Image (spheres, coloured by chain):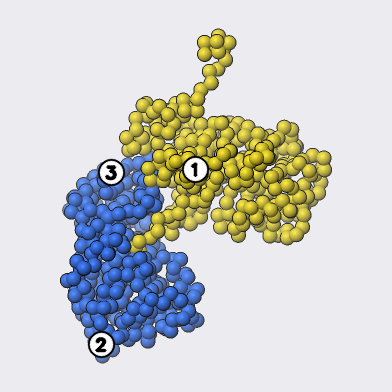
Chain colours: A yellow, B blue
C-alpha cells in the first residue's frame, strides 16, 4: 500500500468497504434509511460488511423520497409504472452522469462493442418517455455507441410500432457493419405478431438486446421461444440475442453473457464489478444457502445518492456465471376473504 | 310478512338453531378449525363468538327480501373466515327451497357441522367440483376473483351467479373519537380471525393532526399487545411472514412503525394511502386533515371496501363507499344478519 501511495496510485477499495461507506452516508442523508436502520436495530456506523446493511424494499420508492440531496437538486426522476393505489416508484438523481457511465461501461463490455455501430431501437424515443430509465438507457446507447444515423432510429412512436420504417432502416444497413437492436420484450412480441414469417435480416455479427417482461402489454412468450423466434426473424444466432435485467430503482444493469462467453447459458445474468445480487430469505432477509432460491437483494454501488441495497420481489438463484431470474414471489395463498394486495395492485411494479 | 317470506324466515331460524347446537359443541371442532385456519385455540374461540345464532325478525325479513328467487341454489365456498358458512347458507335458504353446498376444501368443518346439525333434506352437502354438471339454477360463489371467474366460465348458460369476492375493512376515527377507548374496540376487530376476513380492518384513517394520528398508532400498538396476551395470533405461513417483513420495512422507511411480537402498526407517509398491510394483525394508520379528505384517501380502494367501522356513523356515512357496511367500533365483525356481508353488486 505504501508503494502505491508513493506512486500516487489509488488504493483499490473492496466492494464491502465501498458499500459500508455508502450505507453510512445514506443513513446520514436519507432520512428513510436512517429510520429503516433504527427499526432493524442496525447502527449504520457499526456496519462492517455490506450484508449487515438493511436493504430498502422497492415499495419504499413509491412512498417516500429515496435520495440523499435536497429535492430541488433532483435533475432527473425515473418512475415505475402506476398501480391501482396510484403510487409510482420514483428514483431521483442529481444528474445521470454516474448512471450513464456505469450503463455504458457494462453494456459495451457485455455487447462486445469496440466501435460505433448502427443502433436501432424498437422502443420510444426518450422525449416520449422522459421518466423511463429504459428509454434513457436506449437513447444513451444510441447516442454513445451508435453511428450518426442512429440518432433518430426509434421505431415505436406514439405507442405504435413503425414497422415500415424499421423495414426500410434494416434494408439500408451496410452489410459489412454489424448492427445493434435494442428492444423491449413486449415490443418484440408485437413485431413478431405483425411480421409473421417475414425476415428482417441483420448484417453478420449483429446483436439484439431485449429487456423487460410483458406486463400485460402483449401476449406472453417463454424466453427460449422468444429467443428462437427472434433468431429466425433477424437471422441471428441465438447467442447474439442477449437479455438485460434492470430496474428503475437501480443505476446498474445485468446482462446475459452469451455473446462473450461460449460457456455462458441463456437466462444467466452477469453482474458488473460494482453490483451484486444476493438471494435472500424473504422473511429474514438473510442470504440463503448456495444454490437455493431467494428474493433478490441487489447491492448497487452506483446508487450513490439513493439506496445502495434494495430488496425486490424477484426470485433468483446463484449459478456459475451469475444468477437466474425465476419470476416474481407469489403472494400468500388466501385463508380468508380479506383481499390480498396482489388482487388490488394492477400493472407492473417496475418498468425500467 | 307473507307466507313465503315467513316460511323462509322460519327455515333460517332452524339454521340458527342448528348453529346454536354446533356452538355448544364447539370444543369438538376447535382443534381441526385451528389446524385448517392457522388461528390459535383462543382465536378459534373468539371466532366462534361471531357465529350468528340469533337474529331479529326484521333482519331476517330484510335478508329474505334482498334475496333473489331460485329453485335450487348451489353454494361454493372457498376462501372465507371459518364462521362465514352460516350466512352463506342463510342467504341460500332465503333464495331457494333446495340448497346444496360445496364446503371449502381447506376448511370444511363448520359447513359440515351446520348441515349435519340442521338435518334437513333441503340443505345438503354436494362435493361436486364440475360446475358444468350442476343442475342448480343459481350459484352462490364465495372466493377469490379467480375462483369466481372460473365458475362463471364453467357454469351452464342461464345459471344465475351471485359472487362474493374478497374485500377490505377500514376504520375511520373522527376528530371527536376518544382515542384509547376507540382503539381498544378496533384492536378486537383486528384480532378476530387474525384479519383474514373481509370485514377485518387493515387501515385506520384518523381525522385530525399528525400528532393525533401518532397517538392512535401508539394506542393501537398497546392494545394489540394486550389483545395478543388474551388471544395469541395464530400461525402465519412463510409467505405471509415475508409480506409482513416487506410491509414493515417499507413503512419503517416511509413513515413510522410500532412492531410487537404478534402485530405491527404503521403510520404515514402523509397525503396518500400507502400500500395496504398484509393480514395477520398489521394496521396502517393514515391521516386525513378533514373528513372530506377521507373520501379522497380511500378513493383508490373504494371498490374493495366492504366494511367501515367508526365512532360517528352519521358524519362518516357520506364520505365512505355507499356499498360498505357501517358499524360501531368493535362490531365490524358482527353485521346484522340482514343480507350478505358484502353489499357490492355481484
- How many numbered badges does the structure rendering display? 3
Residue A1: give x, y in percent of width and height: 52, 13
Instruction: In the rendered view, tell whether residue B239 sits above or below residue A206.
Output: below
Please give the name of the residue rendered at 74% of the width and 35% of the height, measured from the top-left corner: A116
Q: Regarding mark 2 in the picture, which secondary structure is present there?
A: helix
Confirm or deny contact between disc 3 and disc 1 (CB under 8 A): no
| Neighbourhood count class around disc 1 (C-alpha, 10 Å): few under 14, some 14–19, many 20 upward | few
Foreground residue among A217 and A158: A217
Image quadrant assignment for residue A192: bottom right
Furthest toward the bottom, the residue is B3
Q: Chain of mark 2?
A: B
Q: CA distance from mark 3 to mark 2?
A: 52 Å
Q: CA distance from mark 3 to mark 1?
A: 35 Å
Q: Which mark is residue A291?
A: 1
Disc 2 target residue: B7
Confirm or deny contact between disc 1 and disc 2 (CB under 8 A): no
Disc 3 target residue: B258
Amino acid at each position: 500500500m505504501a508503494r502505491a501511495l508513493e506512486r500516487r496510485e489509488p488504493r483499490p477499495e473492496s466492494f464491502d468497504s465501498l458499500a459500508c461507506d455508502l450505507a453510512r452516508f445514506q443513513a446520514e442523508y436519507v432520512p428513510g434509511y436512517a429510520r429503516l436502520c433504527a427499526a432493524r436495530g442496525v447502527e449504520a456506523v457499526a456496519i462492517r460488511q455490506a450484508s449487515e446493511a438493511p436493504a430498502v424494499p422497492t415499495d419504499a420508492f413509491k412512498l417516500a423520497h429515496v435520495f440523499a440531496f435536497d429535492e430541488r437538486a433532483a435533475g432527473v426522476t425515473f418512475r415505475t409504472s402506476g398501480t391501482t393505489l396510484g403510487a409510482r416508484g420514483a428514483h431521483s438523481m442529481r444528474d445521470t452522469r454516474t448512471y450513464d457511465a456505469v450503463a455504458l461501461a457494462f453494456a459495451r463490455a457485455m455487447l462486445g462493442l469496440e466501435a460505433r455501430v448502427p443502433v436501432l431501437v424498437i422502443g420510444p424515443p426518450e422525449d416520449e418517455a422522459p421518466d423511463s430509465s429504459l428509454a434513457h438507457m436506449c437513447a444513451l446507447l444510441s447516442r454513445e455507441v451508435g453511428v450518426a444515423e442512429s440518432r433518430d432510429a426509434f421505431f415505436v412512436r406514439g405507442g405504435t410500432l413503425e414497422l415500415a420504417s424499421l423495414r426500410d432502416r434494416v434494408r439500408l444497413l451496410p452489410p459489412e457493419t454489424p448492427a445493434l437492436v435494442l428492444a423491449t420484450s413486449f415490443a418484440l412480441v408485437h413485431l413478431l405478431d405483425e411480421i409473421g414469417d417475414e425476415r428482417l435480416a441483420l448484417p453478420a455479427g449483429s446483436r439484439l438486446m431485449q429487456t423487460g417482461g410483458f406486463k400485460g402489454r402483449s401476449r406472453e412468450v417463454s424466453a427460449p421461444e422468444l429467443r428462437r423466434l427472434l433468431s429466425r426473424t433477424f437471422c441471428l444466432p441465438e447467442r447474439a440475442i442477449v437479455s438485460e435485467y434492470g430496474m428503475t430503482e437501480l443505476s446498474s444493469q445485468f446482462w446475459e453473457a452469451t455473446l462473450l462467453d461460449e460457456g455462458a447459458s441463456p437466462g444467466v445474468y452477469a453482474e458488473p464489478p460494482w453490483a451484486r445480487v444476493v438471494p435472500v430469505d424473504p422473511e429474514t432477509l438473510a442470504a440463503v444457502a448456495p444454490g437455493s432460491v431467494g428474493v433478490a437483494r441487489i447491492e448497487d454501488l452506483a446508487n450513490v445518492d439513493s439506496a445502495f441495497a434494495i430488496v425486490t420481489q424477484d426470485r433468483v438463484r446463484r449459478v456459475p456465471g451469475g444468477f437466474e431470474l425465476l419470476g416474481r414471489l407469489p403472494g400468500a395463498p388466501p385463508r380468508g376473504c380479506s383481499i390480498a394486495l396482489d388482487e388490488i395492485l394492477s400493472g407492473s411494479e417496475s418498468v425500467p | 310478512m307473507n307466507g313465503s317470506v315467513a316460511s323462509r324466515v322460519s327455515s333460517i331460524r332452524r339454521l340458527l338453531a342448528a348453529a346454536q347446537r354446533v356452538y355448544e359443541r364447539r370444543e369438538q371442532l376447535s382443534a381441526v378449525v385451528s389446524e385448517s385456519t392457522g388461528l390459535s385455540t383462543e382465536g378459534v374461540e373468539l371466532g366462534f363468538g361471531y357465529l350468528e345464532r340469533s337474529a331479529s325478525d326484521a333482519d331476517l325479513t330484510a335478508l329474505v327480501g334482498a334475496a333473489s328467487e331460485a329453485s335450487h341454489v348451489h353454494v361454493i365456498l372457498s376462501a372465507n373466515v371459518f364462521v362465514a358458512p352460516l350466512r352463506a347458507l342463510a342467504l341460500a335458504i332465503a333464495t331457494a327451497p333446495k340448497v346444496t353446498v360445496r364446503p371449502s376444501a381447506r376448511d370444511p368443518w363448520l359447513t359440515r357441522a351446520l348441515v349435519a346439525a340442521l338435518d334437513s333434506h333441503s340443505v345438503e352437502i354436494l362435493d361436486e367440483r364440475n360446475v358444468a354438471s350442476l343442475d342448480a339454477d343459481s350459484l352462490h360463489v364465495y372466493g377469490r376473483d379467480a375462483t369466481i371467474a372460473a365458475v362463471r366460465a364453467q357454469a351452464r348458460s342461464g345459471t344465475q351467479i351471485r359472487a362474493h369476492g374478497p374485500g377490505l375493512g377500514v376504520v375511520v376515527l373522527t376528530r371527536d373519537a376518544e382515542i384509547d377507548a376507540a382503539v381498544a374496540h378496533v384492536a378486537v376487530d383486528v384480532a378476530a380471525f387474525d384479519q383474514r376476513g373481509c370485514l377485518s380492518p387493515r387501515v385506520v384513517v384518523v381525522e385530525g393532526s399528525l400528532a393525533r394520528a401518532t397517538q392512535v398508532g401508539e394506542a393501537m400498538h398497546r392494545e394489540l399487545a394486550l389483545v395478543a396476551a388474551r388471544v395469541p395470533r395464530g400461525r402465519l405461513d412463510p409467505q405471509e411472514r415475508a409480506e409482513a417483513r416487506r410491509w414493515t420495512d417499507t413503512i419503517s422507511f416511509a413513515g413510522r412503525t410500532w412492531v410487537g411480537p404478534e402485530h405491527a402498526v404503521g403510520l404515514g407517509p402523509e397525503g396518500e394511502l400507502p400500500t395496504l398491510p398484509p393480514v395477520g394483525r398489521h394496521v396502517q394508520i393514515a391521516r386525513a386533515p378533514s373528513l372530506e379528505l377521507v373520501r379522497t384517501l380511500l378513493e383508490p380502494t373504494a371498490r374493495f371496501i366492504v366494511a367501515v367501522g367508526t365512532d360517528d356513523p352519521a358524519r362518516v356515512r357520506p364520505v365512505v363507499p355507499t356499498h360498505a357496511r357501517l358499524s360501531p367500533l368493535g362490531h365490524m365483525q358482527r353485521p346484522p344478519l340482514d343480507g350478505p356481508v358484502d353489499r357490492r353488486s355481484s
